[in-house]
Amino acid sequence: MKYPNGIIKTNKNIVLYGNRGMSLEADINATNEYYLVNGIAVIHKKPTPITITKVDFPNRHEAVIKEAYFKIPSTTDYNGIYKGKYIDFEAKECSSKTAFPIINIHPHQIKHLKDVINHGAIAFILIRFTHHNQVFYLDGKYLIDFIESAKRKSIPYSFFKEKGIEIKDGFNPRLDYLKVIDSIYFGGDCYGQKIKF
Amino acid sequence: MKYPNGIIKTNKNIVLYGNRGMSLEADINATNEYYLVNGIAVIHKKPTPITITKVDFPNRHEAVIKEAYFKIPSTTDYNGIYKGKYIDFEAKECSSKTAFPIINIHPHQIKHLKDVINHGAIAFILIRFTHHNQVFYLDGKYLIDFIESAKRKSIPYSFFKEKGIEIKDGFNPRLDYLKVIDSIYFGGDCYGQKIKF
């Protein structure tokens, strides 16, 4: 059973989740909304790409999609602008304790990340290891380097611990990933640490 | 009757269309594909935003959307990166000879353009006046200024002639709007002219 305040009650015990039981996507959307409303950044999730094959028009002012199919995305899910820089990222939840399977990010999306990095973007992935209840920022260049050199089918949790930066859950914004970007790209500090690449 | 080479034959005469009978969206998508393949820029159209209310799973590997509705977009249709800068725009066809009705761009989209400009984006609209067979680039700041000061419900064709920049149809890319951006933002020239704002 799930209570609104994020307490999940099972038969045996009460577990209090740091992320208040929300999905990573919901956390990012809430964070982006906070950034937007406070004039910090303009970052949006893209709509799910679909192919529409049938639309009904029950009346002049209404259109109902009656048949459509999910398409493989050709870009990442999130992009926008922060401090004049183009921001681009993908976000995934990972239920494995030990590694993130690369197959969860489409080859198109990896190519896209590479492309935008070549054009000067700040690109990255956000991965939530649900078992550890940790969210990591992994810079796009580490992701690309890993994929191109390691020839493995998954990225070990230890790689995220080493090369990634953990983003602590917050109240508002819930998942302050721009703090990491401030540190890496704009000389700010991140949870009291300067991050050097 | 419509021939593949863009000649439209009616009972009375033959008309040769400069835009080869393609929609503005198709022209922009082909142009963006050209930019992408040639490593010039990464600019994509966002998927149409919809709300999915019913999905069927005929088998384990397939999902068919059986009911969905179109949503009002909260951002513009196109964004991406060019020469390290965040690019954001909306594109519309206009059948009126004399003016473009502002209602064709949602208030959310105008707010979005304003937001991204405040964060340092290159933002604009592309309007095709189908009757004149002309496509104009209108910089976001002129659009916002007009909307906020003129209190009119439409932007006259003459305003596009005065403040906009006409983009000539090309073969490949079909609609080279980055040429205008080169000129305005990167000191390049545009059809032999330097453009000053």
Image: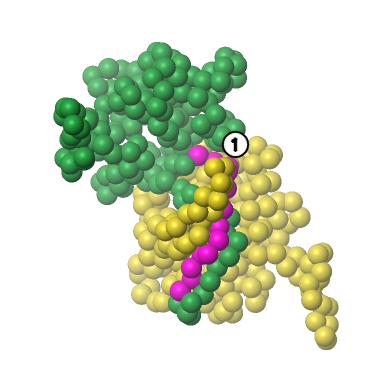
Chain colours: A yellow, B green
Query: From the viewer's perspective, is B132 left or right of A3?
Result: left
Q: How many residues crowd mark 1 within 10 Å: few (<14), some (14–19), many (20+)?
A: some
Q: Position of residue B101 (x, y in %)?
A: 50, 24
Residue nearest the observer in this picture, A107 or A160: A107
The residue furthest front is: B11
Query: From the viewer's perspective, is B124 left or right of B53?
Result: left
Amino acid on which disc 1 is placed: His
Q: Position of residue A107 (x, y in %)?
A: 37, 65
Look at the picture and state if B131 lies above or below A151: above
- Residue at image point 66% right, 58% down: A27
- Residue at image point 30% right, 25% down: B133
Residue B39 forms part of the magenta stretch: no
Callout 1 secondary element? helix
Q: Quadrant of the N terminus of chain A?
A: bottom right
- Residue at image point 36% right, 25% down: B129
Residue B68 forms part of the magenta stretch: yes
Q: Position of residue B111 (x, y in %)?
A: 59, 33
Please give the chain letter of the residue carrying mark 1.
B
Residue nearest the observer in this picture, A149 or A44: A44
Q: Position of residue A105 (x, y in %)?
A: 45, 66
Look at the picture and state if A63 lies above or below A153: above
- Residue at image point 82% right, 69% down: A3
Query: From the viewer's perspective, is B128 left or right of A25?
Result: left
Is any part of residue B8 visible from this angle? yes
Q: Main secondary structure of the magenta part?
A: strand
Query: Which residue in the structure is indicated by mark 1?
Result: B108
* Residues in magenta, as a range: B62-76
